[in-house]
Image: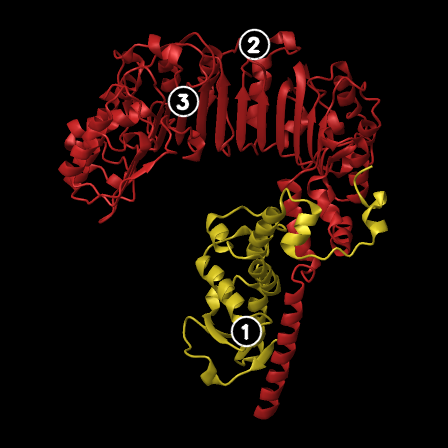
Chain colours: A yellow, B red
């Protein structure tokens, strides 16, 4: 989990009631964000707990671009202070997340961007965002043939011809 | 402690490594999704596209979401190993061999099962059924939906098999559609269903003293219109048994009874559990109202009463049930829309006014054309409102689809001066037209916040300091369109608001009076004429409000 480096105090502006975090994207962009906004992320919350234990200030390196990171921050900012059941660690495992109108608009992006967001959300452990992205992807492949699914999501058909036509692997007969 | 140079060097290496990894991920984005993310996507697919018996060609069925297992090796491996994907089994819509296959792939995960039993093949000889209701599957059931309404006596036999020493410890919801008010055995699942919270029964009954009823949170029973709850169904003292059971269901949160009203009561009141948040009663006027009059409904319960059937209906006694400060309901909905014909006496003017201390009131009257023609004006809501004291009312939902009769303005006057009314929802062509007409006549309505007025078929929305968007749709020729528009525009003038956007049905484009209106009211030039605006109001269920 090599995502943390110590930073100088001057790197993180301000300190007070609303603590700030420094997030560093894979394209080396430094983004300062209020801790409160990112508290929806279990990953970030755990990192912050770690900071408190060492009483050191840190930047958090993240393996995705600033563009994706900003989208995630936008999502977290929108739901700042909102209770979303899927993000409640004490709640039952998330089932079928409800479709939120704002999320649909927010996720109206191209395929690659959607996949990057879901990966980032998974990395950051934001279950509600993973759920919304998963729903959006499921909607994209709904009613499509196997071949169309491959095309839409850029998946390579790596079956051998024998495997592809093996009845044992299918719910058909 | 690392030196500054080392820290910077470490950071750079780290960034380089992350960048490489990121680029790799981009090359084949989906195949690099973590398995648990793919599982999440697949689980959405299961309900977006369920497999079915729909046959594309000979022997080839609609695979639905199962197609995902044919996309690539990793998807197949993940889907095959993710037991939860295979647990939602709608047996009636699947070939038998699929049912067995899904049961196998679901491993030991809890199951949601839908079963439909027909006469052919004769039940319970079906191998699928014998397997499902056997001791290996029943303990895994979380949700069971069983429909044997067409299975005849074979269905009854199956139900009896479920009694035999098979407990269902995980079962949370059970829905049974039976036949001809069949009475289920009281010891179904050996009466061992500790997790059961939701029970829905259609055309069948469970004895009111059945042990599994006492932990239920959601109970819904529906019998046919013509059923009569008498001792013919095998009960003695049915009213007392029902009363006894309802009073002891301490966890009951929602209760729906449709045509489940015992006759011949002894006059004793039934005190419904305090946790009850929603009560729905539906049925023919007389038994429904008689039964309701014996209920002591908690103050916090939302009560919906659906009157279904013909005959003489006197709402006075029903409303009296909710009268007085001791028994005010939180919500009272009286829906007469199911009535095929009626002779309705809404209010007896000789009585004192009835105080309904409710914060929300729903009035729904959806009258078919044939009935409405015969219904005199006095049956409408003006007279009902006359009978109600609505000092505490803050929200009014008024839904009326009156295509032939005239809507009196009296009911509107009822709301005038009711200081707390903040929102008034009106649905229906006539109603909308009538409201605007009334607004023109009675300027007192200017006191009401314009934001609070929503007309789904005659829309003003976005009413704020600078914007007024006004949309007209669904007006019939019975009420002159221009009068309605004038009324609305008058209101706009009074409010001193400019019209930013105006959307009208296409048929009004280019008419001469429209030209005059534009000059008179300084309407915007870019009026939108929408060919898709419906002439009739769009149907919208009340619940969506």
How many neighbours does mark 2 have within 10 angstroms: few (below 14), some (14-19), or many (20 or more)?
few
Pointer 3 with pointer 1, Cβ within 8 A = no
Residue sitting at x 55%, y 67%: A45
Query: Residue B145 or B198: which is nearer the viewer?
Result: B145
Query: Residue B316 or B241: which is nearer the viewer?
Result: B316
Provide the secondary structure element on which disc 3 rests.
strand
Image coordinates for residue B84, horizontal then vertical, percent: 72, 46
Q: Which mark is residue B226?
A: 2
Image coordinates for residue B39, horizontal then vertical, percent: 68, 52
Q: Is residue B304 above or below residue A171?
A: above
Tags 3 and 1 on a common chain: no
Residue identifier under label 1: A25
Q: Is residue A56 above or below residue B315?
A: below
Residue sitting at x 48%, y 61%: A76
Residue identifier under label 3: B334
Residue sitting at x 40%, y 22%: B334
Provide the secondary structure element on which disc 2 rests.
loop
Image coordinates for residue B449, horizontal then vertical, percent: 24, 40
Provide the secondary structure element on which disc 1 rests.
loop
Position of A24 with respect to B445 (left or right) is: right
Marks 3/2: CA–CA distance: 21 Å
């Amino acid at each position: 989990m090599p995502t943390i480096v110590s930073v100088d105090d001057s790197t993180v502006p301000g300190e007070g009631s609303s603590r700030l975090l420094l997030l560093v994207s894979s394209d080396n962009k430094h983004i300062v964000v209020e801790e409160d906004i990112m508290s929806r992320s279990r990953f970030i919350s755990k990192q912050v707990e770690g900071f408190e234990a060492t009483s050191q200030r840190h930047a958090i390196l993240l393996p995705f671009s600033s563009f994706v990171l900003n989208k995630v921050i936008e999502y977290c900012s929108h739901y700042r202070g909102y209770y979303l059941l899927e993000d409640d660690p004490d709640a039952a495992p998330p089932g079928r997340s409800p479709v939120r109108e704002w999320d649909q608009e927010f996720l109206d992006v191209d395929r690659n961007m959607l996949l990057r967001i879901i990966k980032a959300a998974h990395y950051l452990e934001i279950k509600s965002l993973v759920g919304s992205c998963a729903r959006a992807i499921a909607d994209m492949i709904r009613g499509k043939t196997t071949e169309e699914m491959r095309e839409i999501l850029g998946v390579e058909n790596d079956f051998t011809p024998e495997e592809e036509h093996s009845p044992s692997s299918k719910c058909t007969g | 402690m690392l030196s500054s140079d080392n820290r910077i060097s470490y950071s750079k290496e780290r960034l380089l490594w992350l960048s490489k990894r990121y680029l790799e991920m981009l090359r084949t984005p989906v195949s690099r999704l973590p398995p648990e993310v793919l599982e999440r996507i697949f689980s959405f697919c299961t309900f977006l596209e369920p497999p079915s018996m729909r046959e594309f060609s000979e022997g080839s069925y609609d695979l639905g979401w199962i197609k995902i297992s044919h996309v690539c090796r990793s998807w197949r491996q993940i889907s095959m190993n993710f037991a939860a994907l295979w647990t939602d089994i709608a047996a009636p819509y699947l070939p038998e061999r699929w049912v067995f296959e899904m049961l196998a792939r679901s491993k030991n995960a809890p199951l949601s099962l839908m079963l439909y039993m027909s006469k052919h093949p004769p039940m319970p000889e079906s191998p699928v059924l014998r397997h499902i209701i056997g001791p290996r599957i029943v303990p895994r059931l979380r949700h069971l939906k069983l429909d044997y309404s067409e299975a005849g006596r074979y269905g009854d036999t199956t139900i009896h098999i479920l009694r035999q020493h098979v407990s269902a410890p995980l079962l949370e919801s059970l829905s049974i559609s039976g036949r001809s008010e069949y009475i289920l055995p009281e010891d179904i699942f050996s009466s061992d269903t500790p997790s059961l919270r939701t029970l829905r029964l259609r055309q069948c009954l469970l004895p009111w003293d059945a042990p599994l009823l006492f932990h239920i949170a959601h109970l819904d029973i529906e019998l046919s219109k013509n059923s009569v709850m008498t001792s013919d169904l095998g009960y003695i003292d049915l009213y007392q048994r029902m009363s006894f059971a309802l009073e002891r269901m301490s966890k009951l949160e929602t209760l729906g009874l449709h045509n489940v009203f015992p006759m011949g009561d002894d006059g004793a009141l039934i005190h419904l559990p305090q946790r009850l948040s929603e009560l729905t009663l539906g049925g023919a006027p007389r038994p429904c109202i008689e039964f309701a009059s014996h209920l002591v409904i908690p103050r916090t319960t939302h009560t919906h009463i659906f009157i279904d059937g013909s005959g003489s209906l006197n709402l006075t006694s029903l409303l009296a049930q909710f009268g007085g400060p001791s028994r005010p309901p939180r919500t009272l909905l009286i829906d007469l829309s199911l009535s095929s014909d009626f002779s309705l006496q809404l209010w007896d003017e000789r009585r004192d006014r009835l105080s309904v201390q409710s914060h929300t009131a729903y009035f729904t009257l959806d009258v078919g054309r044939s009935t409405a023609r015969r219904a005199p004006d006095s049956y409408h809501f003006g007279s009902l409102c006359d009978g109600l004291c609505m000092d505490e009312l803050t929200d009014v939902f008024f839904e009326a689809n009156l295509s032939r009769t005239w809507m009196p303005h009296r009911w509107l006057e009822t709301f005038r001066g009711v200081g707390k009314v903040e929102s008034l929802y009106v649905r229906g062509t006539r109603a909308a037209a009538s409201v605007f007409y009334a607004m023109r006549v009675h300027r007192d309505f200017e006191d009401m916040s314009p934001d609070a007025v929503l007309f789904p078929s005659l829309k003003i929305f976005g009413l704020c300091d600078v914007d007024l968007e006004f949309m007209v749709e669904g007006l019939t020729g019975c009420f002159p369109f221009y009068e309605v528009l004038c009324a609305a525009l008058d209101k706009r003038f009074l409010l001193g608001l400019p019209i930013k956007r105006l959307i009208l049905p296409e048929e009004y484009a280019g008419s001469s009076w429209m030209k005059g209106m534009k000059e008179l009211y300084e309407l915007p030039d870019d009026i939108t004429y929408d060919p898709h605006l419906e002439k009739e109001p769009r149907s919208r269920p009340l619940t969506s409000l």
